[in-house]
Image (cartoon, rainbow, N blue to C red):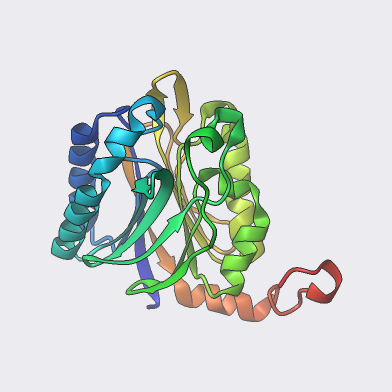
């Protein structure tokens, strides 16, 4: 695919209110489809937020949420990526689902848990990265705090990712870090980054919004402030390949010196 219309869906997640969040997401996805969007990225834990106290109960609704999302993506002709609380073998994981026109083609459990906010005390961590073939190209997934670990993004790039989707709940005090790291991950790996953050106050926390769609050259193709919005931008995959052919970062790496794959 040479041209791809991407969307980052940013909204104020209602803590623990699954019905409200589902309605917001369904309406947003319909607006993205009406604008001829092909890929839609949702925030992290978009159905519940970090409602730790009630998460074991709330996570039981995730299978039906995924099924409904499959049906909606099939109806609208969309690829969607967003994370939800997944209950498995007595543990809860922060899991991103990649849904391609109604089919779950991949899932990714967040690798890096944010210990500063107690995420590691409530959630299990994943054990593998994810790059998956979809109808919009090769998609890699990272979730929020993963953004601070460039090794993961380089691994996704080496595995052929053309777009990395980043669902997030990134707090306002570190908004500048969010913006800088997103551009860095796009530039250093020469790929598109589509990052969807939540916004405004959720419980005791204030989230910065600032969702972004960024090109392999670091150009900000679309950006949000702190409002509920569907960011939409056209991504030129052919241009990405031309740039990679001109500046051969992945080819010129010295893995023999710094020991990464």
Total numbered labels: 0
**Residue extending farthest front:** 89
Q: Is residue 244 left or right of residue 226?
A: right
Quarter holding residue 249: bottom right
Residue displayed at 53% across by 33% down? 121
Q: Work out which quarter of the rendered image holds the N terminus and state it.
A: bottom left
Q: Is residue 177 left or right of residue 163?
A: right
Q: Is residue 24 left or right of residue 147?
A: left
Q: Work out which quarter of the rendered image holds the C terminus and state it.
A: bottom right
| Residue 6 place in picture, x, y as percent | 36, 59
| Residue 79 place in picture, x, y as percent | 30, 63
Residue displayed at 46% across by 73% down? 237
Whether 161 is drawn above or below 118: the answer is below
Residue displayed at 51% across by 70% down? 161
| Residue 115 place in picture, x, y as percent | 60, 34
| Residue 241 place in picture, x, y as percent | 54, 78
Name the residue nearer the viewer: 244 or 17. 17
């Amino acid at each position: 695919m040479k041209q791809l219309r991407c969307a980052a869906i940013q909204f104020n997640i209602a803590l623990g209110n699954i019905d409200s969040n589902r309605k917001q997401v369904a309406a947003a996805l319909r607006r993205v489809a009406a604008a001829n969007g092909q890929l839609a990225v949702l925030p992290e834990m978009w159905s519940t937020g970090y409602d730790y106290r009630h998460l074991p109960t709330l996570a039981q609704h995730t299978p039906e949420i995924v099924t409904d999302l499959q049906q909606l993506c099939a109806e609208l002709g969309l690829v969607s990526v967003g994370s939800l609380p997944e209950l498995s073998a007595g543990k809860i994981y922060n899991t991103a689902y990649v849904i391609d026109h109604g089919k779950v083609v991949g899932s990714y459990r967040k690798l890096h848990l944010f210990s500063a906010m107690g995420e590691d005390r409530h959630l299990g961590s994943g054990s593998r990265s994810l790059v998956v073939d979809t109808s919009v190209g090769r998609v890699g997934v990272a979730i929020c705090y993963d953004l601070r670990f460039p090794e993961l993004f380089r691994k996704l790039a080496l595995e052929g990712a053309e777009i990395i989707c980043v669902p997030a709940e990134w707090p306002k005090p570190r908004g500048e870090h969010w913006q800088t790291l997103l551009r860095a991950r796009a530039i250093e790996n020469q790929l598109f980054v589509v990052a969807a953050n939540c916004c405004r106050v959720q419980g005791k926390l204030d989230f910065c919004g600032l969702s972004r769609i960024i090109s392999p050259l670091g150009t900000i193709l679309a950006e949000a402030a702190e409002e509920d919005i569907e960011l939409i931008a056209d991504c030129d995959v052919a241009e990405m390949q031309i740039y990679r052919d001109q500046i051969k970062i992945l080819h010129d790496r010295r893995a023999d010196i710094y020991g990464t794959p």
